[in-house]
Amino acid sequence: MKFYMAPLEGITGYIFRNAHYDYFHPADKYFTPFITPGLNSRRTSKALRDVLPENNRGPEIVPQILTNRADEFIYTEKQLMDMGYQEINLNLGCPSGTVVGKGRGSGFLAFRDDLNRFLEEIYRNAEVKISIKTRLGKDSPEEFDALLDIYNQYPLEELIIHPRTREEFYRGKPNLEMFRLGLEKSRCPVCYNGNIFQKADYEDFCRRFPEVTSVMIGRGLIADPALLDIILGEREIVDKPLLRQFHDRIYGDYADMLSGEVPLLYKMKELWNYMICLFTNAKKYGKKIRKTQSLKNYNEIINTLFETEEIIWGAGFGANGLV
Ligand SMILES: Cc1cc2nc3c(=O)[nH]c(=O)nc-3n(C[C@H](O)[C@H](O)[C@H](O)COP(=O)(O)O)c2cc1C
């Protein structure tokens, strides 16, 4: 099985990816949060900072692009190719209102003729491998069949399926029936993404789909960065001192990158929205972390958390009723 780290905008930037790679069983590929390109080179350069080779020395990185314009995609693809990247991922899954409103991400799935033209142009001009991360459709899973007919016309490196519609955002359970349709019908390799939060979720999935050879994990791997170690039988539970080191590394790297307390606190709070699930008394500490307004107070809370609370056996994203 190949394991990919899913992109989570605002969380899995290079600081998180590099720390994960250094401290835990690394993912086979790390997909970057989306880059929204512009033909204005200044805007694009800013968007590309996360993928600059000097920031990404260890892990295998797949940069992701979010656009519905073939010229923008091709322009950015060229820049990424010049940096040495050999695979690029197209985001056809983002459900956010502003993105969908512009007909991008999962919003693009509703415009099948435009999508087909876009794909025709980017694959005709492709100089690197292009994979696609898709949802089942914008409004209904019934859209997926027609989307697969479109995807099957092009040489996709891989089709990563998050089997929900845009309307579902991240609610409910992934639609495994429709995932099966994708697996059976797709001409390219298929990767599964969605709700693998614990080892048992992974094992259930493998029992149901033994033919799948790659899975992408997002929230589960942020909540428990040792999830791959656990899935692979290298650890039974995340080691608390190691988690503390991982936290401190991320904290230190953000402190070097950001100026002022507020942005650093904001970044750390985002991480704790997920990671707190692992601890006893998670609700109480989650609230304290969310409320704190100063780094001094933040550090005190984190010190007490690590000193007095324990990691819960079998915990992961969604444990403790915290989602
Ligand atoms: C806060 C947040 C940010 C995300 N950002 C991206 C993104 O930039 N690109 C993308 O393809 N998916 C993005 N996703 C979706 C995840 O990559 C993934 O598909 C989703 O979380 C389902 O997988 P999981 O159940 O393993 O978390 C985001 C999800 C969340 C919750």
Image (cartoon, rainbow, N blue to C red):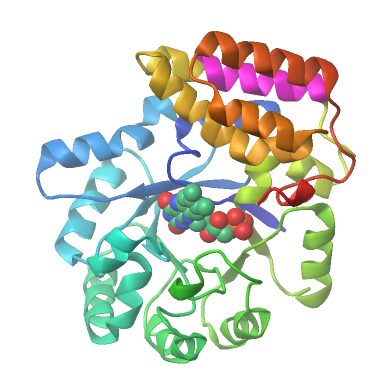
Report the predominant secondary structure element of the magenta stretch: helix
* Magenta extent: 240-252
321 vs 165, nearest the viewer: 321
Q: Residue furthest top?
A: 296
The x and y percentages for residue 267 are 47, 29
- Using residue 279 as the reference point, say whether residue 157 is left or right of it: left
Q: Residue at x 39, y 24 (%)?
A: 54
Residue drawn at the location 49% of the way across and 91% of the way down: 142
Task: Tell me: residue 291, above or below residue 67.
Answer: above
In the image, residue 278 sits, relative to residue 289, either above or below, namely below
Which residue is nearer to you in this view: 173 or 224?
Answer: 173
Q: Is residue 307 visible?
A: yes
Query: Magenta stretch: residue 241 in it?
Result: yes
Q: Residue at x 37, y 61 (%)?
A: 90
- Relative to residue 49, is residue 196 depicted above or below? below
Q: Is residue 321 above or below residue 269?
A: below
Estimate the x, y position of residue 127 in percent, counting from the top left. Answer: 29, 58
